[in-house]
Amino acid sequence: MQSHVVVITGAASGIGQELCRLFARRGAKIGLLDRDQSKLELLADELREAGAHCFAAAVDVGQREHVHAAVRRIGSTLGPIDIVIPCAGICRASTVDDLKVPELEEIVRTNFLGAVYMIEAVLPSMLERKRGQIVGVSSLAGLRGIPFEPGYSASKGAVAIYLESLRRELRPRGIRVTTVFPGYVQTPLLDEINVLMGADMSNGKASTPAAAAAAILKAIERGSSHVFFPWSLGLSVRLSRLLPPSLYDLVMERMFGRLPISRVPTPVADSAKS
């Protein structure tokens, strides 16, 4: 990773933040993108004090023009981008009574289109150089529909399918594509879900952001096409895809049907969890 140029969205907290720290320790040049400018500046200062070469920009990844402008600035400051990791994401866990289409649109714009815009911005340079790596963060929640998270599940499922389609085309052209499927990670998003459900949905087994970032970095270094974590939950969710709809509905009813569901008023950024 020495001297590689890595761009990470959702960089100011959670998994994105820990990835920035890991890449900095390996001597990478890092482009930090996040819409929380104050947290972003704190992280950039931390990395620079540790000797890292980085560029930080406050960007809403749901704004295509802003994404392209930031990528151009990173390219002119740090050099051609070798690895892009669209980590930015938001979720609003809610009951069906609370679903609001504008909020669903924001989730899709940030989680799915935000990744699409980032890939669009860096891909021409990668294709020209015939090398690069795209690391997209989907979710185990994107493998099957999860109650109370329709927008989140749909947006993360879209990320997974989009990356799968790209991987088939880009592999022969020297560009690797890795799809990340996190489960429960200790982020503000998990806190929100637990409040809504009235229970700890991870049963105390949520990954730390640092552990999640380490798993992602290992997959990047190996050139893996997929990474699922935690392993046991990843296996369970993948096996659930073999269940017929009626049986899957029964499983979901047993898991969620008796929880003391409450209402959550505002969206929470997950900065690339899960």
Image: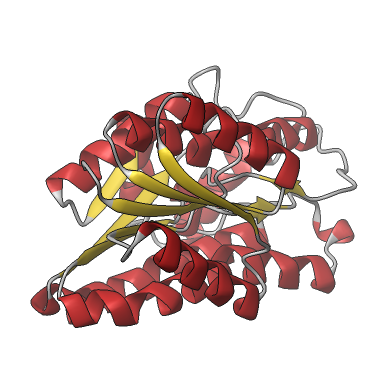
Residue 91: % across, % down: 68, 52
| Snapshot quadrant of residue 98 | bottom right
Residue 9: % across, % down: 53, 54
- Residue 224 located left or right of residue 190: left
Front one among 229 and 98: 229
* 44 is higher (above) or lower (below) than 168: above
Residue 265: % across, % down: 90, 47
- Residue 65 located left or right of residue 259: left
Q: Residue at x 40, y 35 (%)?
A: 52
Quarter containing the N terminus: top left
Q: Residue at x 73, y 73 (%)?
A: 105
* 252 is higher (above) or lower (below) than 259: below
Front one among 225 and 20: 20
On the question of residue 115 being in view, the answer is no
**Most extreme residue toward the top, as rendered?**
204
On the question of residue 80 being in view, the answer is yes
- Residue 197 located left or right of residue 228: right
Residue 216: % across, % down: 32, 41
Front one among 122 and 237: 122
Q: Residue at x 21, y 82 (%)?
A: 128
Front one among 130 and 208: 130
| Snapshot quadrant of residue 135 | bottom left
| Snapshot quadrant of residue 210 | top left
Display coloring: secondary structure
